Image (cartoon, rainbow, N blue to C red):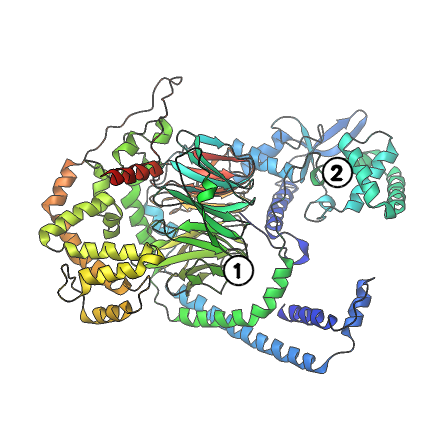
Amino acid sequence: MTINTLAKGGWHRDQMACFRKMEKVIVAMQDPDMGMKMRNQRLLITVIPHAMTGRDVINWLMQKYNMCEEEALHLGGMLVRYGYIYPLKEPRSLVLRADESPYRFQTPYFWTSTRWPATELDYAIYLAKKNIRKQGELMEYEKERYSVLHKRINHTWDFVVMQAREQLRASKQRRKADRIVLECQEQAYWLINRPPVSLTLSTFRIYFIAHFVCVCVCVCTFCLCLQIEFCRRALGRNRVKSSICLEGFVKYSEQYLSHDPIMQGCLPSNPWISDDTAHWTMNTEVVPIPSRLRVERWSFSFMELLNDAMGRREFMTYLEKEFSAENLCFWQACEDIRHGENSRIVEKVEEVYKNFLAPGAARWVNIDSKTMDKTLKGIQHPHRFVMDDAQMHIYFLMKKDSFPRYLKSDLYKNMLAKAIVPQEVKKSVFPFMRRQRHSSPSPAQAVAQASEEEGRA
Amino acid sequence: MCKHYLYSILCISTSLCFKPFRCRSLPAQRKYMRSPPIPEMATQEVQLSETLAHLKTESDTLKGKLEEERAKLHDVELHQVAEKVEGLGQFVMKTRRTLKGHGNKVLCMDWCKDKRRIVSSSQDGKVIVWDAFTTNKEHAVTMPCTWVMACAYAPSGCAVACGGLDNKCSVYPLSLDKNENLAAKKKSVAMHTNYLSACSFTNSDMQVRLSRMGEDTCSSFVTALHHFFDLTELFKVFRHVLHDFMSLQGCDKKANVWDMRSGQCIQSFETHESDINSVRYYPSGDAFASGSDDATCRLYDLRADREVAIYSKESIIFGVSSVDFSLSGRLLFGGYNDYTINVWDVLKGTRVSILFGHENRVSTLRVSPDGTAFCTGSWDHTLRTWA
C-alpha cells in the first residue's frame, strides 16, 4: 500500500510514472507507420475522421506487446478509465468493448497529467456552457453540482458566465466536425475527472508536506554524514562473485522444486484445489509417520532440521544415544531467552547458567574459553542477546559434527525408509459433487484444551 | 535543493519576529520578508550551505567508488546462468476461495502457521480472523480507529497483532468464547508519535516487530536513522544463524538491510526509479525482492551486494504493491495496482502468467506457510486464495 507524499509541483509521484507510461502507449498507437489504422465516424450527415473500433485497439495491443486477448482487454480498459481513449457511443460507460464500438484518442490538452488537478472554476465554466447551450441538458448529478458550485464560488460567478459565453462564441466559429470533436473531448475529460459516482481512480493520499519540509533541512547534514560513513564501511565489505551467488539460486530452486506445491503439486492433492485436507493431516507438526518429502528436507540444511518439531525430536533422540544431548537443550534454552518475555529473561539466564555453564553443572556444554569468559561476564548484566556467542558456538559444533553423522546414521535411514509417499488423488471427476469442507480446530482451541488438561492433572 | 529549504525555514523564523499582517498577495509578502537582511543569519546560511555542498560531493564520490567495487565481481547475468534450467510449462492458477465480509478496502493480511487460517485488516476498522479453507469468519475485532494498516498472526495461532492510525500496536488473544469481548483482553504497545505501518511477530508470541510511518525508527530494537522518509512495510525476518537481519524499504527509493541486534544499516540498494512498496526475502535468505511504483520488481543478492534481476514488461504500467516468493523461490508473485497479479520466473526473468479477478488494486499478497496457495487482499473489499 502506498502512502504518497506530495512531490514537487503537487503531482502524486506514483501517478505521474503511470501516466507517462500510458502516454507512451498512446503515442505508439498514433504512430503514422506502425500505429493503428483510423476509421471515420458517421454522425447523421457529418463525417468525423480519427475514430477507431474497440476491436482495432485490442488487436493492435495484442500484436504490439505480444499478449493474450484478456490482457489486451485489461490494458485497453485502463487506457479508457484514465481518459486517454474515450468512447463515442456511450460516453458515460468507460469500458473498452471488443467489438465495433467507436473510440477516439483524447487530445493531450485534456490528458490527466497535463491538467491535474481539475479545478472547480474550470468545472463551473463547463457546466455553465452546457447550461447556456441548451437549457435542461444537464444531468441530475450535474445540476446538483452546479448549484453547489454556484453557492461556493458565488463571488466569481460573473467571471464564470462571461467565460462560458466567450467560449461558446468562439466555438461557433469552428467547423461543425471540429466543434463536435472538441465537445466530445471536453465531455470525456469531465466524465473522468468529475465522475457521476465517485469512482476511486486516485490513490489514497496522506499529505505530509509540513513534515517533508521541516524534517528535510535539519536532517540533511546529519543524513549526509551517515551516508558517507555507510559508504566507507561498505567499501571494505567482502563481496562474492556473481556467478557463485547466482548458481546458488539455481541449486536452491532445483533442490526445493519437488517441495513446492505450486510448481509441482503436492500429494495426495492440493487441499485448496481438491477440498481434501489429507495433505495437511499428513503433515501436522507431530505425526506417527512423517512423509518422505519431509524427512528428505531435513537433510537439506541444519536449519531445516531444527525448524521442524519432529526433526528436532529425532535429532534429540540421536544425540542422547551419543551422549551429547545437552548441546541441543542448551541451544533451545538460548532460543527461548532470545524470543521470550522481557520479564523472565533474568530468571531464564540464571537457569541456563545453573544447568549448562556453571562449573560442575549437570549438563555442562563444551564452549571454548574465550567465549565462556565473554558469556560469564555478560551474565552479570543479563539481556536478550547475552547468550548469542555461546549459542552460535554450539550451533556450529552441532552443524559440523553431529548433524552429518546423524544423516548417515541408521536412525535417520530407517526414518527415511519408513516414511510414506502418499498416493496422488485426482480431483473428483463429477463437477457437481463438491466435497464437504470440514473445519479444523483452531490452534487457540488446542492450547486452551491443553491447559485445561494440565489444570486437571 | 537544500539551500532552498534552508532559506524557507529561515524565512518562517524571521516572520515570527515581525508584527502579524494579512497577506493580500504573495509577491508583496516576500518582498517584506526579504528586507532588512540580518547580517548574522546571512553568514550562517552561507557557511551551512558550503558545508552541505562539501558533504554532498564527498558522498557522491564515495557512492561512485562503491558502484565500481560492486561491478568488479559481476561476471555473469542471472538469465545466462539460468539458460540450462528447464523452462516452465503452462501455468494454471485460479481463485479457489473468495473471502467476503470486509466493508472497505483490505489493507493487510497474514497467514497462521496452521496453513489455512488468515487474519486480515481493513479500512473499516475491522480485523477478521478467517478459516480461509471453509471461508468461515472465526473472530472479528473492531478497532477504535479506521485504517488498520498492519496485522499479523502470532506463531502459536493464539493471538493477532494489529495497528494503524491509532498510533499503537494492539495484541488480541483469540478467545473461543463467542460471547467474550476480545477487545477487553487486548494488550497495547504505545507508539507515541506516528501511526503504525507494519507489524509482525518474531519467532514467538512475545515479541512484535513494529514499524512507524514517517520516522526512521522501527521496532523496539532497532533505531535506524538512515531513512528519514516513510517506511511503509516491514516483513519477515530471516534468521541468519543467530543474527536477525531485516530489510526495509522506504519512499526514498532505497532498500536497506539492517542488523536487528546492533541497529546498523548493513547494506543499501538504490536502483528503483520510484517508491518501493514491498520487500520480501528469498527463501534461502541470500537475496530479497522488492516491488515498486515504477512497475518493476527487482532481485537483490546480499552476498554479491548488487541488483541481479529486473522483472518488468513494457505493457505493465502500474506499480507493484506487494511481492512474495513461492516456497522454492522459483516463482515471484506480484500484486499490482492495475488489479492484476503477475507471476514471474525468478531465474529466467520472464513472466509466466497474469491472473485476473480482483476489481480494484491488490494491496497485499502472501504465500501460505507450506506454499500450497497464496492469498491476496484488495481494495475491492475481498480476499482471494489462489492455487
Q: Quadrant of residue A176?
A: top right
Q: Quadrant of residue B27?
A: bottom right
Residue A2, given in percent of the width and then of the height, sits at 55, 49
The front one of A45 and A428 is A428
The front one of B59 and A176 is B59
Q: How many badges with numbers are in the image?
A: 2
Helix, strand, or loop for circle 1?
loop
- Estimate how packed mark 1 is, as few (under 14), some (14 to 19) or many (20 or more) residues with alpha carbons within 10 Å: many
Q: Is residue B373 above or below residue A350?
A: above
Subunit under mark 1: B
* Residue pointed to by mark 2: A185
Residue B150, given in percent of the width and then of the height, sits at 48, 47
Which quadrant is home to the C terminus of chain A? top left
Residue A49, given in percent of the width and then of the height, sits at 74, 34
Residue drawn at x 39%, y 35% as measured from the top left:
B176
Subunit under mark 2: A
Q: CA distance from mark 2 to mark 1?
A: 44 Å
B341 left or right of B53 in image: left
Q: Amino acid at mark 2?
A: Gln
Helix, strand, or loop for circle 2?
helix
Q: Is residue B48 above or below residue A276?
A: below
- Estimate how packed mark 2 is, as few (under 14), some (14 to 19) or many (20 or more) residues with alpha carbons within 10 Å: many
Residue B278 shows up from this direction: no
A115 left or right of A62 in image: right
Q: Residue furthest front?
A: A456
Say if labels 2 and 1 share a chain: no
> Marks 1 and 2: in contact by CB < 8 Å?
no
Q: Quadrant of residue A146?
A: top right
Q: Amino acid at mark 1?
A: Glu
Residue A365, given in percent of the width and then of the height, sits at 16, 61
* Residue pointed to by mark 1: B215
A124 left or right of A449 in image: right
